[in-house]
Amino acid sequence: MGSASIQIHDVHVDYPVEGRGMRRILSGIDLKIEKGEFVSIVGQTGCGKSTLLRLILGEETPTRGRVLVDGWERHQPDLTCGYVPQRYSLFPDKTVLDNVTFGLEVTEFGPFSLLHSARRKRMRQFREEALRYLRHTGLQEADARKYPHQLSGGMQQRVAIAQALIMKPPVLLMDEAFSALDPGTRAGMQRLIKELWRESGTTIVFVTHHTREAVCLATRIVALAEDSAGELGSSVALDLSVPHLDFDSDEEAIRCLIREVESATLPRAGSARARTTPAYN
Amino acid sequence: MSFFHIHSHPGRAAGLILSWFLFAAGIVCYFYVAQARHRDNPDDRVMPTVTQMVRAFQDAGLKPAEDQEVQEGAESQPLITRIRASMLWKDTMATTRRFLISIALLFPAVVLGLHMAMFPYIGALFLRFFQFFDKIVALSLLPIIFIAFGIDELSKIMLIVIGVTPTIILDTFNLSKGVPREQIVKAFTLGAGDFAITYRIIFKQILPRILNSIRLNLKAIMLFLFAGEMIASNDGLAYRIALLRRHMGMDTIIPYVLWVALLLFLVDLGMNTLNRKLHPWFQET
């Protein structure tokens, strides 16, 4: 599985607000994510974390500035970026196995796969590969025949990860992917994603409002903070290089880093450009 | 037990009794009043007795209509031949044919609604038009339809198309728009193109809801069909009811109305069963 870099150059995003003109959400975001990095994006609710992710996906276009993934500006989501949202990740009308093989099938056969003569043989191969991915994400073969609503939230997210990873995307974007899970399931999923990242070397951008999760998973944290020098409510990106911690790391070091990240997300006066905090370099 | 407590649920037996009570009460009331009327006037035609209705329904189901030619020796023919030559069979077949054509014509409406929701240019072209079109009372167009399309089959089908398709189009549009955006984004990231997403993600997800929507519109379809048949037709269940009204043939009209209700109930039941079988994931969601 390859990986890709992401470059965000002076990105501004404005949204129209009914009767009140435009509202700036992101203000002058400058960010470079290298190949194979695990970057967490943190910030308070409504600060534009998901907007930033949608910009990388190509689902949204910035009002000003450019977003390049693997050197290319993209105008709609494609195979370059895998995507695991918080909810609605799985197609409810398909079984777990069909959800995971969907990408392979549609890429090979197009929209009307039933018309292809080689379909049966290839589908058998796809299913075997999908089962391998499902086992790897901790699911049983018996789960493959179930529909998404028959699975728990944690199992659904495991399937969503398998569904995204089977396409071997150079970039994996996760939008609050574990937010709806209970603490125990969440911890298991965090370990799983870190393990998969180490194995695959894919670039991961992980949006979360859970600071501990961000600190323990990422190699770098981007904190979106309110730009008090700019328009009210708009966010700037603070680029925090962090020591590579893990869930088993020293609790004091984790807490110290959490304080650092949380203080960075508070409103501050200053530049509308990304800054690097050198403390942990 | 209380009718006005939110948390008060009827037990199994009470639920069963309550759900059939109004049926039983209606039937009892009808026959009580019918018997009373027949005691006063044995020739009463407004409220026929059970015997009269059963006899009339038997005649309708086994004999040709009065306005049709009766073949010699028809009484001695096999039962199936007599049923197929009967007034009820011929009327049912005529209405069913029109009904099925109308249902088939709803398919392009579903496809159009889906495309309007998925492709913004198509949506921009059609949405406002159908929102306006949906507000036109189809029955008010009846004279225009008969003038424009004549009084044959086409006008009756057009009445249903004009009456029901805008609703189905807008319903499909809204259902398609209701599928979470995450599903579309996810499908794009898995390599699906526009048509794969439209037909393999969105259409498959909304299909059970569309079938439900069509089920809910069955009565509207029949309403428009009956209006067309009553005004301009030579056969069909509604034509027969309209014809019998002239002769005060309540002994046949009431069984015909119940027969239509039974047919509609069976279509509804069949569609519901089919929906459940085709989309097991939907019922359990």
Image (spheres, rainbow, N blue to C red):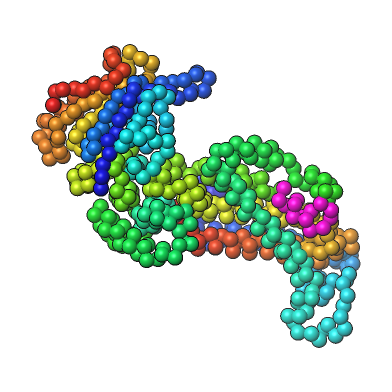
Identity of the residue drawn at 25% across and 39% down: A203
Quadrant in the picture for residue A64: top left
Q: Which quarter of the rendering shows the C terminus of chain A?
A: top left
Q: Is residue A196 above or below residue A206?
A: below
In the picture, measured across the screen, residue A200 lies left or right of residue A227, that is: left
Q: Is residue B285 above or below residue A209?
A: below
Identity of the residue drawn at 83% across and 82% down: B74
In the picture, measured across the screen, residue A244 lies left or right of residue B284, that is: left
Identity of the residue drawn at 87% across and 64% down: B44
Identity of the residue drawn at 24% across and 25% down: A239
Where is residue A193? Give x, y as percent.
23, 45
Q: Which residues are magenta?
A: B149-162
Residue A143 part of the magenta segment: no
Where is residue B26? Give x, y as percent.
70, 59
Where is residue A172? Give x, y as percent.
30, 41
Q: Say if residue B202 shows up in the picture.
A: no
Residue nearest the viewer, comparing B180 with A79: A79
In the picture, measured across the screen, residue A82 lies left or right of residue B79, that is: left
Q: Is residue A255 above or below residue A90?
A: above
Quadrant in the picture for residue A128: bottom left
